[in-house]
Amino acid sequence: MALSLFSLIILLYWVITELFTILFRFTGLPDERARFQVISLLTGCGYTTKESEMLLSNRKRRRLARITMLFGYVFNITIVSAFINVFLSLKLSQVEHYYFGIVIPLIAVAIIFLFIRVPRVRAWGDEVLQRFANRIIGQTESFNTVLPLDYIGTDSIALVTLNVIPDEYQGVSLAKTQLKAETGILVMLVEKPGEKAVAAGADTVFEVGDKLTVFGDYTVICKAFHARERFADI
């Protein structure tokens, strides 16, 4: 029973960590840095790095960080103590009927380990989850995606995949789009399907399938390219 309860707590921590990581990613924080900060906030370990400035420099992230800390505090007190009370309240005659409960948490932990550590399994899981999410919110492949890669100051380096060319950029060279002048977005690299990424030039014309490495405000990038975040690693 102790092992079963321990496994359930680990499973809950993992699920909660992933949920809050997704919320921070919505604010433009890269995946790995978001996950590290979430674990630090939920556990209350107080581990501080220079990356913590990313949370302090943004009002939405500060608010979300406060919610994460409060949730972690309440979770540690309420859930853990509840599990302990359940364990202590069981009679010896009842314990033997709960041994089968050890198997389910262990299987769940093993599945989570496979999804995290095995690249092929994780890639398959990402694809399944992406399709499931698309069905729920009615999305199709006819929208552009953006994936934060890094964070510098208040701006982000992101990878934008063009599945659809916005009307204002169709058949127009990069110089004529006025992206840098009007939005502050800098297009640094362009990767054509099956080719290596090259530096973007003034005469670059966007095409379907292009992957753009851009620098600028995350929210502005999403609006400029009509893009939504892609929950998958490169």
Image: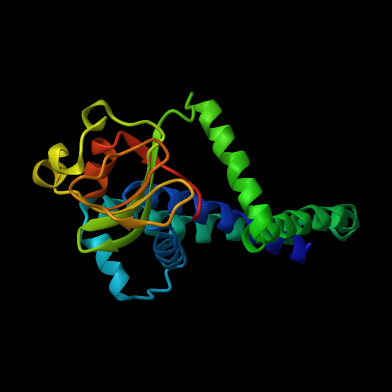
Q: Residue at x 39, y 55 (%)?
A: 68
Residue 88 to residue 128: above or below: below
Question: Can the viewer see residue 56 in this picture?
Answer: yes
For the residue pair 144 and 108, the one nearer the viewer reads as 144
> Is 140 situated left or right of 149 in this image?
right
Question: Can the viewer see residue 66 in this picture?
Answer: no
> Is 122 situated left or right of 50 in this image?
right
Q: Position of residue 109 (x, y in %)?
A: 71, 59
Scheme of colours in the image: rainbow
Number of labelled discs?
Answer: 0
Q: Residue at x 44, y 28 (%)?
A: 142
Q: Could you say which quadrant of the image residue 99 lies in?
A: bottom right
For the residue pair 26 and 141, the one nearer the viewer reads as 141
Instruction: Give the quarter of the figure containing the N terminus.
Output: bottom right
Q: Residue at x 26, y 30 (%)?
A: 170
> Is 207 situated left or right of 180 in this image?
right
Q: Position of residue 123 (x, y in %)?
A: 61, 51
Q: Could you say which quadrant of the image residue 174 lies in?
A: top left
Q: Residue furthest top?
A: 138
Residue 182 to residue 41: above or below: above
Q: Residue at x 56, y 58 (%)?
A: 13
Q: Position of residue 119 (x, y in %)?
A: 64, 59
For the residue pair 166 and 203, the one nearer the viewer reads as 203
Q: Residue furthest left?
A: 181
Q: Position of residue 226 (x, y in %)?
A: 30, 33
For the residue pair 32 and 74, the one nearer the viewer reads as 32
